[in-house]
């Protein structure tokens, strides 16, 4: 039974259905070989039908996407126009309200100025300048200088300017910050210890020499030089050295490391200085 499965024409659609399978069962071997050769050479009607269906579906999908895109663009454009119109209307309304408020305030100010000008009596005679009597007390005798008025409510509270107070520090903040960073990041192996220091309240021990809390000592550092100071032990790591004389306002705050490395030195009072 020599029955063909499909025509060789590329214009006819061939469906892969039950009829196609049923006809393929009864085909001879040579006919099946011919159909297979057509498939290998990409010339079988079934392939052309599948391509046409695929192109048709792709075109339909493309048209659908373009239609959706056109609708979305139209909707976005309409929304933008609606919002722009609403914003423009709100802006116009706000400008109108501001203009009305400005006009109202301007009219009120004009009325106020006209009223104040109307109540002024420009024909009133000016008062004569004050004449000071020569028998009143003045800064340079009678009638020869500035008049000294008695203290009243109007001249008792005179505006006296307070002089500006300027505080000049010994060091600037960048230098202080730099030295603190050096101290905090310095390894212990690079420290040069000049003397051994320990604080045992209420005593400070430097190389087996003890100093009591509140004792007058001689303190020296590079900034203030040598000064007579009163020793105050603040903590087990910090001491204060304040000027012992009433006129001396210098003050040194030193740590145990400052004393160990020799940045601040403390010596006892000499015998001849204690009697002074």
Image (cartoon, grey):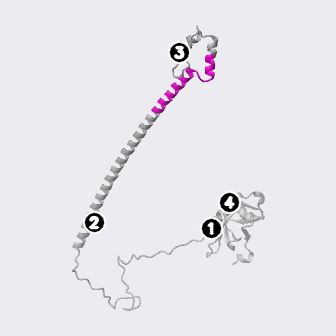
Q: Is residue 19 visible?
A: yes
Circle 2 residue: 109
What residue sits right under mark 4 in the picture? 181
Residues at marks 4 and 1, CA–CA distance in whole angstroms: 15 Å
How much space separates mark 3 and mark 2, taking CA atoms? 95 Å
What residue is pinned by disc 1? 172
Q: Earlier in the sequence, mark 4 or mark 3?
A: 3
Q: Which quarter of the figure has residue 30?
A: top right
Left or right of residue 190: residue 107: left
Q: Are marks 1 and 3 in contact (CB under 8 Å)?
A: no
The percent coordinates of residue 114 (x first, y second) are 24, 70
Residue lying at 40% horizontally and 40% vertically, measured from the top left? 74
Residue 205: percent from the left, percent from the top?
A: 74, 63
Numbered disc 1: secondary structure: loop
Label 2 packing within 10 angstroms: few (<14), some (14-19), many (20+): few
Range covered by the magenta-colored residues: 34-63
Please give the name of the residue rendered at 35% of the width and 50% of the height, measured from the top-left corner.
88
Q: Is residue 134 left or right of residue 271?
A: left
Dot 3 crowding, Cα within 10 Å, few <14, some 14–19, many 20+: few
Question: Circle 3 sits in a helix, a strand or a loop, which is it?
Answer: loop
Give me the residue at 56% from left, 19% from top: 8
Whether the magenta-drawn stretch holds residue 254 is answered as no
Could you tell which of marks 4 and 2 lies nearer the N-terminus?
Answer: 2
Decide which of tag 1 and tag 3 comes sooner along the chain. Answer: 3
Question: Which residue is identified by label 3?
Answer: 17
Mostly what secondary structure, the magenta segment? helix
- Tell me the residue at 42%/76% (across/down): 159
| Label 2 residue SS | helix
């Amino acid at each position: 039974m020599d029955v063909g499965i499909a025509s060789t024409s590329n214009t006819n659609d061939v469906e892969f259905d039950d009829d196609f399978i049923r006809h393929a069962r009864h085909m001879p071997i040579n006919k099946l070989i011919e159909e297979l050769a057509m498939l290998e050479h990409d010339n079988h009607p079934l392939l052309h039908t599948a391509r046409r269906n695929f192109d048709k579906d792709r075109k339909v999908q493309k048209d659908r996407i373009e239609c959706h895109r056109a609708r979305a663009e139209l909707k976005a454009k309409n929304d933008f126009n609606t919002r722009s119109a609403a914003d423009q209307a709100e802006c116009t309304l706000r400008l109108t309200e501001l203009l009305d408020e400005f006009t109202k305030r301007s009219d009120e100010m004009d009325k106020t100025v006209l009223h104040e000008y109307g109540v002024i009596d420009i024909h009133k005679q000016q008062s004569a300048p004050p004449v000071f009597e020569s028998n009143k007390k003045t800064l340079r005798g009678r009638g020869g200088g500035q008049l000294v008025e008695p203290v009243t409510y109007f001249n008792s509270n005179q505006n006296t300017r307070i002089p500006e107070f300027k505080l000049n520090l010994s060091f600037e903040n960048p230098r202080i910050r730099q030295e603190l960073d050096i101290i905090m990041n310095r390894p212990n192996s690079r420290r040069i210890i000049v003397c051994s220091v320990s604080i045992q309240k209420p005593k400070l021990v430097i190389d087996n020499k003890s100093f009591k809390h509140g004792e007058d000592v001689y303190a020296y550092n590079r900034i203030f030089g040598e000064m007579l100071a009163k020793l105050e032990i603040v903590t087990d790591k910090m001491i204060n050295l304040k000027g012992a004389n009433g006129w001396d306002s210098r003050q040194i705050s030193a740590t145990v490391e400052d004393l160990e490395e020799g940045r601040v030195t403390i010596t006892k009072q000499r015998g001849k200085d204690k009697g002074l």
